[in-house]
Amino acid sequence: MSEEEERFGIGEAAARTGLDPDTLRYFERQGVLPAPRRDTAGRRQYVAADVELIRMLVHLRETGMPLADIAQFTGADAGAADPSRLRLDLLAAHRRRVEDRRDALDRALDVITRKIADYAGRTADSPQVLRRPDTTIAHSVQGEGPPLFLVGAPVGRGGFAALADELAGQFTVVTHDPRGIGASRATRGMAEPTPEVLAEDLAALVDTFTGAPAMFVGVSGGAVTLLELAVRHPHLVGSAVLHEPPLVTLLDDDALADRAAAAFAVAATDPQRAVQEFYDLSGAAHHTGPDELPPAHVALPELPAEELDKNRYFLGRMAGPSVFYEPDAEDLRRARLTVCAGASSHHQMARRAAHALAALLHQPLIDMPGNHMGASAEPAEFARALVPLLLSTAP
């Protein structure tokens, strides 16, 4: 008897599918699962095809398919003129529901991640302060080992808190709030947060710890800051990992550049509209594989006043200079840089830009866990992938 023809009882079927025997009986009574054959003693007899069907049922139930649809899919309600077409239609409709749920979960995760960063920043120990000519830069230090600077824009100390915890066992991790972000409050007369100005702030911060080359990780706008640091202060950059610098200038996409410029232009007066437009054009909150495109538009809920104020500054003053920054390829090729992107960021603006930057620097693009927000949303996985890159490129 072949494996496909082998018959076994309900106990073994339950063990193979991870369900209790009572659950299998319940699915039969509810008309969700076709009744199996029975032997002469009336005991249920399952074959391999039954087990595969039950496993599929489990996947459909876990992803929220209605029981009535599952019954049609498994054939428990019988009577379909074309079972294959029916199953195809059911799965296509269910996939759309799952994708909608995933988009909603991605948006919720984005909000939760930002709130974690906010509360982490509020509850962290009092930061140290670096005085600059026109403002102060709040920074925190933890761990032991060679110095490692985590750099973001707008991500600050709070957004890097979880990743810093993961890395503190091997490095002295330094995080800071870029000017105008978090505890680095915007002040009257403060210079605009361009990559050039942010790079000078970072250089001053590095000088307070070491005059020797250090290691850096830059995320999103922070990766752009590191590009400028490598040009202005190459002696400070021992090595740098750049994760998805969102450089529209490298994409040869005038329509995308125009949309970005339009979003930044209205941020001061209509931050809700600016956030919506930038969310849609970047696709950065979504998880997309090689064969998936981010949705063209997903309506965002009304943002609270605190978030609107933050985006007046971020989208109105910080994001534009970073997104439209033009890297100096000749100088950067002499630096020890590694360009990375989220494995779930395919066809999104920042991954496309990272791919273009890697090509400009004559190096491969390295995949990292998660999407554009992998460093904060998946800190443990991100750290595990990051450490070998840091150690292999360390000066």
Image (tube, rainbow, N blue to C red):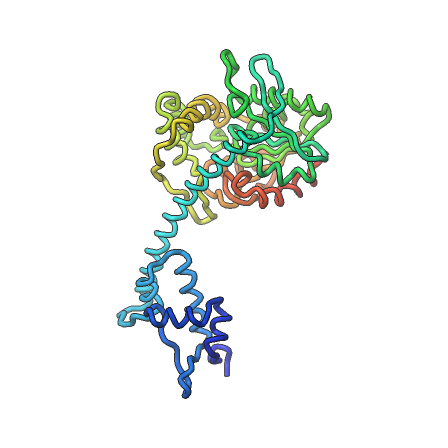
Question: Does residue 365 appear to the left or right of 31 in the view shown?
Answer: right
Q: In the displayed structure, would residue 77 be above or below residue 217?
A: below
- Comparing 65 with 282, the one in front is 65
| For residue 228, above or below residue 188 | below
Residue at position x 42%, y 29% in the image: 307
What residue lies at 66% left-to-right and 37% top-to-bottom? 168
| Location of the C terminus (image quadrant) | top right
Q: Is residue 280 above or below residue 98?
A: above
- In the shown orientation, is residue 121 left or right of residue 296? right
Residue 191, relative to residue 326: is it above or below? above
- Residue occupying image coordinates x 47% and y 77%: 4
Whole-percent x, y for residue 296 in the image: 36, 40
Residue 62: percent from left, percent from top: 42, 58
In the rendered image, which quarter is residue 140 located in?
A: top right
Q: Say which of 172 and 249 sits in front.
A: 172
Residue 162 percent coordinates (x, y): 57, 38
Tell me if I can see residue 223 in this picture. Answer: no
Residue 240 seen anywhere in this rendered image of the structure: yes
